[in-house]
Image: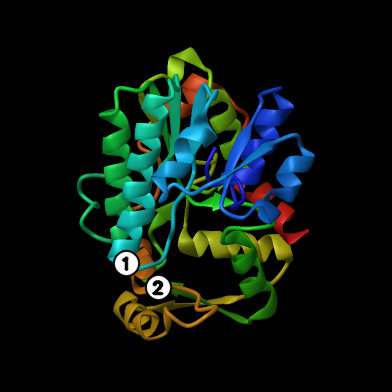
Amino acid sequence: MTGATGFVGPKVVHALRAEGHEVRALVRRPERGRQLATWGCELAVGDVTTPETLPLALAGCTHVVHLVAIIRGRPADFRRVMVEGTRNLVAAARDTGVSRFVLMSALGTSDATKDSVPYFGAKWEMERDVRASGLEHVIFRPSFVFGRDGGVLPTFVRQVRLSPVVTVIGDGRQRLQPVWVDDVAAYFTRGVTLPAAANRTFELGGPDRVTWDELYERVAKVLRKRRRIVHVPAELARTGASLTEWLPGSPLSADQVSMLEGPDNVVSDTSAVETFGLPLVPLDEQIRRAAA
């Protein structure tokens, strides 16, 4: 498994271990995998961008779960980490006899968006390479992944809790369908072995679709706050982000603003719900958990 020390990764490891699966995590720095090791996860030192480290890491593995991605960087960084890294991992998986490759993509990835920002372009190429690999595969495209200890939801909660005015980029009418991180982990855990999932792509979203304005209103309601929403034109936000995106702690990059400005981030079909049949955490409960 790659990306095991990120935001979603530890949840996937924990869920896999709870189902009795043996898990080996590819880590660049073993000290970051200490929690994983306490759950019985084996650590293999390596990096998807260093192909010579992968055959040993995959030796004896029957499945690959690939979560590695970056959200910021130069176009060359996206290509090196996401595109070339995935190609290296696919090649090693083929050579070592892996039977299924499970990929984390992203909702919004499509032929129409692949040229809009490097992130979507890299995800599109990752998907294409996995499909063309000859390996049995499952591809998941989650919407915004919410959680208590990572992702963007805690930031939204802090905004509403601490500021009397909440800024929303654009007109606030684009829709999103946030999915709870443990639900994503459950999808990946089922996706490793479920026969009906083979060679399919699934869009993942939670039970609720909301606009950005409605999301902040939901957060304010859970926190029992009254907040004014102010809309910031996307072009103005993009200009500001382009000036500060390389500073430590900057909230957004210009590309991320463009992604927020894009089409609705909601699932287009119900195949994931129908195939996996998992109970999903409603949005208000997601917010309550993050606010606790």
Q: Which residue is mark 2?
A: 253
Image side of residue 216 versus residue 170, left or right? right
Report x, y in % for residue 254: 35, 73
Residue 94 vs residue 212, the one in the foreground: 94
Which mark's residue is nearer the viewer, 1 or 2? 2
Residue 61 visible: yes
Residue 205 in the image: above or below residue 265: above
Within 10 angstroms of label 2, few (less than 14), some, or many (20 or more) residues? many
Within 10 angstroms of label 1, few (less than 14), some, or many (20 or more) residues? some
Residue 134 in the image: above or below residue 225: above
Residue 168 vs residue 200, the one in the foreground: 200
- Give the residue at x 46% y 47%: 143
Residue 224 vs residue 289, the one in the foreground: 289
Residue 106 visible: no
Mark closer to the chain start, 1 or 2: 2
Residue 241 in the image: above or below residue 171: below
Image side of residue 192 versus residue 263, left or right? right
Disc 2 marks which amino acid? Ser
Residue 195 in the image: above or below residue 163: above
Disc 1 marks which amino acid? Ser
- Give the residue at x 54% y 50%: 145
